[in-house]
Amino acid sequence: MLRDLRLALALLTVLPLAPKGVGEEDFKRSVAFFPLAGYLLGLPLALLALLPLPPGLSAALGVALLLGLTGFLHLDGLLDLADALLGARPREERLRILKDPHLGAFAFGVGGVYLLLLFQALALVQDPLFLLLFPGWARFAFLPFLHRYPLLGPGMAALVRGGPGPLPSFPPCPSSSSTPSPPSSPFSPPGGWPAWPGPASGGSTGTPLGP
């Protein structure tokens, strides 16, 4: 179990914890620990909320922590997805753009709006328990969509597809009177939007799933 947890952390964070001699089945088993990796990402956010900081400063530090600890993984996927899906293009062109490392106008626009929403959400939400658990919930919510569409090619989605569900000890996302409901919260993109890109691109990759 510890080996699978280390691999999940290596996949979803910048922590250099990947065990040696990793095989195909190891990647699949690591899926069960994706929510736990999310809780560990939520821990510094919860601790930050306990400090006597102005909401704006706390939110800015929270955005920096999320981007830094994840290695900009989710933001990169969102930017690629924005360029590929926004605008009238044939399927083949969308797939080509998904693999293109360059950024277009759609990526800059969507990325800027996402960061503004994330900053505003972190400034408004000061509940340490919510901040602790929500990243784990977000990394659980995308799992049902992992098998919904055919794979478009090799990548992270192909590596982890077919793995077990989350551990039974996975707790529900806490509710808060001062926070929006999970589906509409800016904490969840791009992990919370996987139902839309599948039909548009013709299949699934790790980019829209953004685990």
Image: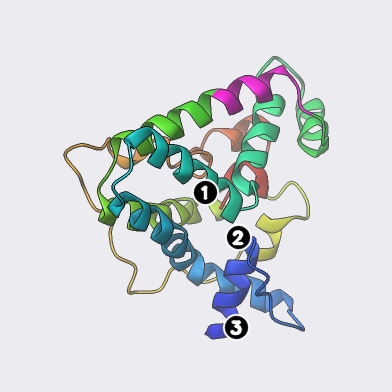
Residue 3 image label: 3
1 or 3: mark nearer the eye: 1
Q: Is residue 108 magenta?
A: yes
In this rendering, the label closer to the viewer, 3 or 2: 2
* Residue 114 vertical placement versus 190 (above, below): above
The residue at the far top in this view is 88
State the SS at label 3. helix
Q: Looking at the image, which residue is at 43% across and 68% down?
A: 166
Tag 1 residue = 66
Marks 2/1: CA–CA distance = 9 Å
Distance, label 1 to label 3, CA atoms, is: 24 Å
In the image, what residue type sits under mark 1? Answer: Leu
Residue placed under numbered mark 2 in the picture: 13
**Image position, residue 74 (x, y; %):** 60, 45
Element marked by disc 2: loop
Seen at 28% across and 59% down, the residue is 172
Magenta-tinted stretch = 103-112
- Tell me residue 164's x, y (percent): 51, 72
Q: Residues within 10 Å of mark 2 (few under 14, many from 20)?
A: many
The kind of residue tagged 2 is Thr
Asked if labels 3 and 1 touch by Cβ distance under 8 angstroms, the answer is: no
Query: Secondary structure beneath disc 1?
Result: helix
Q: Earlier in the sequence, mark 2 or mark 1?
A: 2
17 or 65: which is nearer to us? 65
